[in-house]
Image (cartoon, rainbow, N blue to C red):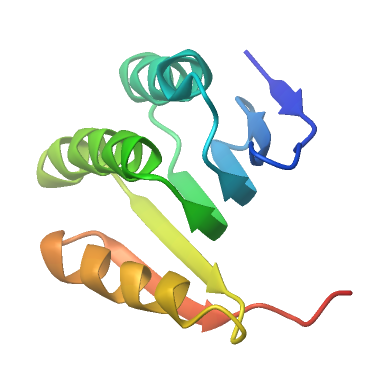
């Protein structure tokens, strides 16, 4: 149930760890087949929420997202909110690049739509 996918110019790098309950996604997300990419991530979140009771962490460092990728993130956040409302310990860390103000805005907008623990912070600069 662990997964590690390298990022491409149009898809994010994805690392998921069943043992630590951590999902990391970083990079651009505007694939031609968003459903194909995100359905695995959504299924992993659903499975880990159903199978184990460890705290779950989501670490996002999005750059550019298309509308379908944003919709997939909303699906994940909706599942997390249901679990949070049932008492599950969850956290979201949203890292943004200060050269991309839209990413920070999207993180702020998302944090206002959910009661989850959101930490929105500037990502360390990497060239």
Q: Residue furthest front?
A: 32
Tell me which residue sits at (48%, 49%) in the image: 58
Instruction: Give 66 or 6, whichever is nearer the viewer.
Output: 66
The image quarter in which residue 105 lies: bottom left
Tell me which residue sits at (45%, 35%) in the image: 54
Q: Where's residue 64, x and y in %?
A: 52, 57
The number of numbered badges drawn on the structure is 0
32 sits to left or right of 84 = right
Q: Where's residue 19, x and y in %?
A: 64, 28
Q: Where's residue 11, x and y in %?
A: 64, 36
Instruction: Give 37 or 56, whichever is nearer the viewer.
Output: 37
Q: Residue furthest right?
A: 127
41 sits to left or right of 89 = right
Tell me which residue sits at (43%, 43%) in the image: 55
Q: Please state, as top left, top right, bottom left or bottom right, where the N terminus lies in the image.
A: top right
Tell me which residue sits at (47%, 82%) in the image: 101
Q: Please state, as top left, top right, bottom left or bottom right, where the C terminus lies in the image.
A: bottom right
The image quarter in which residue 79 lies: top left
Q: Where's residue 17, x and y in %?
A: 65, 30
21 sits to left or right of 114 = right
Q: Is residue 81 above or below residue 51?
A: below
Q: Is residue 118 above or below residue 74?
A: below
């Amino acid at each position: 149930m662990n997964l590690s996918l390298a990022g491409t110019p149009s898809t994010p790098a994805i690392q998921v760890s069943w043992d630590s309950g951590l999902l990391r996604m970083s990079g651009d997300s505007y694939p031609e087949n968003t459903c194909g990419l995100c359905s695995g991530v959504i299924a992993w979140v659903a499975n880990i929420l159903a199978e184990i009771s460890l705290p779950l962490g989501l670490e996002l460092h999005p750059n550019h997202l298309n509308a379908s990728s944003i919709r997939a993130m909303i699906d994940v956040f909706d599942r997390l909110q249901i679990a949070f409302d049932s008492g599950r310990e969850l956290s979201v860390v949203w890292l943004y690049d200060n050269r991309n103000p839209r990413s920070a805005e999207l993180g702020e907008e998302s944090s206002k739509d959910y009661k989850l623990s959101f930490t929105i912070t500037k990502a360390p600069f990497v060239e």
